[in-house]
Structures are given as C-alpha cells and as structure tokens.
C-alpha cells in the first residue's frame, strides 16, 4: 500500500492521528533543508522516524476497523491481524488512553474491547 493510501485509511479510522502524520510528512522537505541549527534530515533519517510511526498508526487503524464491526478480545484481534498479542494489547492500551476504545466486559478473565462512537 502506498503511503498516501495508508494515510487515507488511517484518517478514516483515526482522523486526529492521521492528521498528525500528514503534518509530519508535509514537513519532510523543510527538514531536508535544515532546521535553525543547520541540521538536515536525510531521506534515510526521515524514513527511520516516519516509517515506524506510520506502521504503528496503520496497525491501530486496522484494530479500530475490526472493532467497528464487533467487540473483540486481544487473542481474536491478534489472530485476525496476524500480530503478536502483546503488540495488539499495547495498541489497545494506547487507544483506551485516547478514549477511542473501551472495555465492554469480560469473557472469563479476558477483557472484551469495543470501539467508542
């Protein structure tokens, strides 16, 4: 998926997060020219910062997309997304902190998450 398509998908699920990434991407050329200290970002340095942020935001957007359809447990989300349970749980914690996801209940001892509307 191209960066712009990925950003559009992220914006559809998380408008605020997508906008932050877009602002960073828009600053790419000014960072390459240099900051007030004369430091310039190379393409590689920018990608070392931007790519993990984009990847993480995309994973969170995929989680939000699944939670839009129905409530899920961490194990179920991890299986559907082919991701590690710990990574899915870390993303869910961040989404809970941002009030985008909440715990809908428990299935035995496992929390069931749902998207906040």
Image: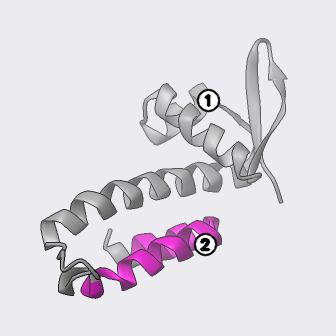
SS class, disc 2: helix
Of labels 2 and 1, earlier in sequence is: 2
Q: State the residue at coordinates (77%, 52%).
A: 99
The main secondary structure of the magenta stretch is helix
Q: Quadrant of residue 33?
A: bottom left
- Start and end of the magenta stretch? 5-30
Q: Image point 62% across, 44% down: which residue?
A: 94
Contact (CB < 8 A) between labels 2 and 1?
no
Return the mark for residue 2. Answer: none
Of the pair 59 and 33, the residue shown nearer to us: 33
Q: Mark 1 sits on what residue?
A: 74
Q: Secondary structure at mark 1?
A: helix
Q: Which mark is residue 12?
A: 2
User: Residue 31: horizontal and vertical position, in percent?
Assistant: 26, 80
Q: Looking at the rendering, which quadrant does residue 73 occupy?
A: top right
Q: Quadrant of the C terminus?
A: bottom right
């Amino acid at each position: 998926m191209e960066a712009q398509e990925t950003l559009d998908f992220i914006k559809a699920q998380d408008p605020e997060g997508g906008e932050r990434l877009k602002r960073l991407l828009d600053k790419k050329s000014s960072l390459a020219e240099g900051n007030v200290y004369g430091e310039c970002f190379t393409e590689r340095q920018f990608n070392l910062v931007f790519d993990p942020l984009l990847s993480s935001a995309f994973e969170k957007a995929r989680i939000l997309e699944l939670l839009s359809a129905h409530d899920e447990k961490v194990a179920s989300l991890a299986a559907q997304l082919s991701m590690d349970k710990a990574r899915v749980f870390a993303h869910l914690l961040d989404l809970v902190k941002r009030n985008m996801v909440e715990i809908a209940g428990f299935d035995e001892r496992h929390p069931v998450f749902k998207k906040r509307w």
